[in-house]
Image: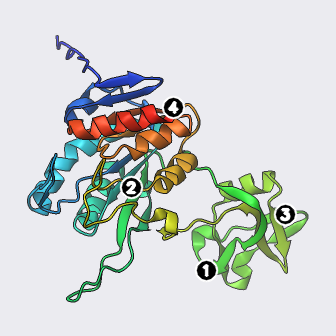
Amino acid sequence: MKKRKKAYTMKPYYQQNGITIYNNDNLEVLKTLPSNSISLIYCDILYNTGKKFDDYEDILGEPKEAMEWYRPRFEEMKRTLKKNGSIFIHCNWRLDSYMRILLDEIFGTDCFRNRIYRKHSDKRGFYSNFDSQVDIILYYVRNSDSFIFHELKNDQLKVIPLYENGYVPERSYTYEIDGVTVDPASLNKHWLITKSQLEKLVSKDEVVVIDSLPYRQTYAIPIGNLWAEDVMLDPYSRSVVAESYDTPKPNAVLERIIQMCSDEGDTVADFFLGGGTTAVVAKEKKRNGIFCDISKKACDVTIQKLENLNK
């Protein structure tokens, strides 16, 4: 008879008011966490730049070696995600193509939601190539049929087409709205949403028919996959060492992700904690959190930021 492996616990570096921080290798931490327990994972991973910083090295070898290092970590992250959970992996041009293939393999191509481009800085004067001004955030869900996604809203009503030119068989159904049968295919057009998505909008009285075609009237804020607003730019200089941590991401990035892809009281996790932005925003947005970094400095910086919230 097979014996079950004995579960073991790992002592947190910090634990208070729903926030737990580990100062350990993230793979070892992940192995201790229960399955189906985390609603949202965001990781600003190692970019494999080949650089050495004062408290860590961003060196993983060739891309194939880097993927071998990442594979068990992402497999564990998938295991810990709830069935309606999401994961956002923040990287850059060095690894994003390899990372997409690896995440497709682990999560499934049907669970890939988007590739988000986050503008990180203005031009820096490169002369031998086009300047790289964006990072990439790869967005996946655990279950393509059921996941948390909240639209952000304001007080401005918008009317948005629910159709597009061209015939697409699976998006060419007919549907009756307020006594009018809508058939985009008859006009060589197709629906932009599935029938189940349409039914949800209809139940909220958000669908109107204008000249035989469907539109959505909504207060939702349209957010694309190019995040280029000023609040999305890096809050640090790339040539001056920051007082607290070298490369923190702006709060606005995590505010958007956490608000749209989790609920109050959910557990948010970041296994490459760095400057602690994820932990700070999670706390501000009334989420619980599990965080990890192998760097003691990263953990200490985060704890100080969390304590400053309570002052």
Q: Quadrant of the N terminus?
A: top left
Residues marked 2 and 1 touching at CB (< 8 Å): no
Q: Where is 137 relative to 5, above or below? A: below
| Gap in angstroms between the C-alphas marked 3 and 1 | 21 Å
Please name the residue that numbered disc 3 is placed on.
Answer: 177
Q: Residue at x 32, y 43 (%)?
A: 273
The image shows residue 303 at horizontal and vertical percentages of: 36, 33
Please name the residue that numbered disc 1 is placed on.
Answer: 167
Tell me which numbered mark, 3 or 1, is placed earlier along the sequence: 1
The image shows residue 73 at horizontal and vertical percentages of: 24, 42
The image shows residue 107 at horizontal and vertical percentages of: 35, 49
| Gap in angstroms between the C-alphas marked 4 and 2 | 23 Å
| Gap in angstroms between the C-alphas marked 2 and 3 | 45 Å
Please name the residue that numbered disc 2 is placed on.
Answer: 249
* Mark 3: amino acid: Ile
* Mark 4: amino acid: Lys
Res 38 visible? no
Residues marked 4 and 3 touching at CB (< 8 Å): no
| Gap in angstroms between the C-alphas marked 2 and 1 | 42 Å
Q: Secondary structure at mark 3?
A: strand
Tell me which numbered mark, 4 or 1, is placed earlier along the sequence: 1
Question: Of discs 3 and 1, which sits in the foreground?
Answer: 3
Q: Residue at x 24, y 21 (%)?
A: 10
Q: Where is 178 relative to 124, above or below? A: above
Q: Secondary structure at mark 1?
A: loop
Q: Is residue 234 left or right of residue 101?
A: right
Please name the residue that numbered disc 4 is placed on.
Answer: 311
Tell me which numbered mark, 2 or 1, is placed earlier along the sequence: 1
Res 181 visible? yes
